[in-house]
Amino acid sequence: MSKIGQYLLSVIATTLIVSISNVLIEKKGAVGSALKLVTGLVLATVIVSPWADFHIDDLEHLYFNAESEAAHHIQEGQTAARSEISAYIIEHTQAYILDKASILGLDISAVVILTNNSRQSIDSIKITGTASPYARTRLTQLICEDLGITEERLIWSQNNG
Amino acid sequence: MKRLITLILLIVLLSMPVSAMEFNAPTAPESAEHFLPDSSTSFSQDLWYIIKKAISALYPSIAESAGTCVTVVIIVMLISLLEGFKGISAKAVDLGGIIAVSTALLSPSNALISVGVQTVEAMSEYGKLLLPVMTAALAAEGGSITSTALYTGTVLFNSVLTIGITKLLIPMLYAYIALSVGKAAMDEKVLCNLHSFSKWLITWTLKISIYIFTGYLGITGVISGTADAAAVKAAKLAISGSVPVIGSIMSDASETILVSAGIMKNAAGTYGLLAILATWIGPFLQIGIQYLTLKVTGAVSGVFGCKRVVELIDSFCVAMGILVAMTGTMCLLLLISTVCFMKGVG
């Protein structure tokens, strides 16, 4: 409030000086008019003086700050959404594999690994468990066809039955 | 013992959030908390609750404003009475009356200006906490371009308006009041011109800032919203066009996350809207009551003559109107941007 007090004081003091000078120079013709103009300008300058503290550079700085903050918050939101999507894909793909495995009478566990890029496609699948050669071939075929991955990216680590 | 440990573990597991993605609105400022309902029912009911609470908390302000109003009317009556006596200078009576009315009105006006400044700052601070949540939620929903434009614009305007109000317009409002007193006391032409100029400058600044802000939101909303909608559509098409099973899983995942992000964003936005309104409504009614009582005081005082004193009362009334406009502009800015965030992609 001290700044406001200072400002008010300067406005009131200038107003008083201008008013007194206006009374004194009231009937002085052209010189009087010119002086009135000057005092009027001085008063107007004092009144709008807080605006002088406002610089366009500050605005630019604020804008770039806001933009970099926005990028940071967007990154946070997208990361949260991506990790949620990844969890969903992993969970449902695992459920799909286990469902197919149970139809084939297999007791396995599957770990789905997604790619690190933004597309979030399946990078590889690690299957652990016991499977007969037929069941293993059949499951591999199903997974490759339905989940769109190559045989090389399907890693079996099992005790073959 | 084993059962107890299992039970505790189960409770801990159950209390954990199901989703890792959470977008919660920040808690409302302290001044707004007692206006907000304990549990949310619907937006309209919550809004009604806030209004009822704010009105019920208004009685002390009404009593205070009425007290000031009565004091001023009594002063005006005394001036009118004294002006009727012969031998007493009308100018001296008027000047005495102006000083008395100014003294009576300055203190409550000063207190309300402080309330206005605090409200603007509280809303601005709350906006700075709410906007990142809304930005992240909108980005999770696929509106990264929209959220960049909205966040950047709102934060910029929020900062500019807060600095503008606290550092430029509030000093000018004080200057306006000082000029009103000077104008009433001296009836000087220069003072009259400066008095109307300062009022024009404050109202013009507020109007222009809200026009520019809504214009900015309108233009960027159309451009970025279309770009985001196209990007989301393209992503969906790319996913559904891939391998059948995994394509459908990925499509479902994307759809589910978009919907849940949207739900969380709207819940946070709704709470945010209520919190902003709850922060604003108390001071708004308080200043509004002062504005209305000053209007009534001006009208009643007009009956007794005393033109210059009535003009002074009207100027104080205008100052309160400007204060309402300042808090209202800040509130409107945050409400508009929150609604734009809630509208989201498309």
Image (cartoon, helix red, strand yellow):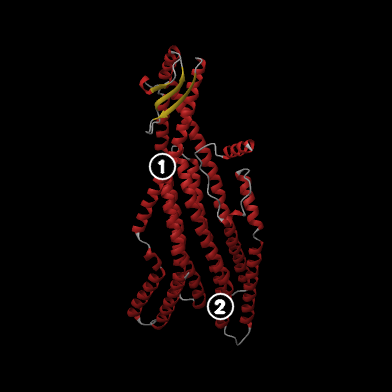
- The N terminus of chain B appears in which quarter of the rendering? top right
Q: Is residue B183 visible to us here?
A: yes
Residue A154: image quadrant is top left
In the figure, A160 relative to B17: above or below?
above
Give residue B96's position: percent from left, percent from top.
57, 80
Give residue B279's position: percent from left, percent from top.
56, 55
The residue identified by callout 1 is A75
Of tags 2 and 1, which is closer to the observer?
1
Residue B28 located left or right of residue B231: right
Which residue in the rendered view is the most extreme toward the bottom?
B87
Pick the front one: B138 or B293: B138
* Kind of residue indicated by mark 1: Gln
The residue identified by callout 2 is B99
Q: How crowded is mark 1: few (under 14 residues within 10 Å), some or many (20 or more)?
A: some
Residue B67 located left or right of residue B255: right
Residue B109: image quadrant is bottom right
Which residue in the rendered view is the most extreme toward the front?
B1
- The C terminus of chain B appears in which quarter of the rendering? top left
In the figure, B335 relative to B304: above or below?
above
Pick the front one: B132 or A125: A125
Do dots 2 and 1 share one subunit? no
In the figure, B147 relative to A20: above or below?
above
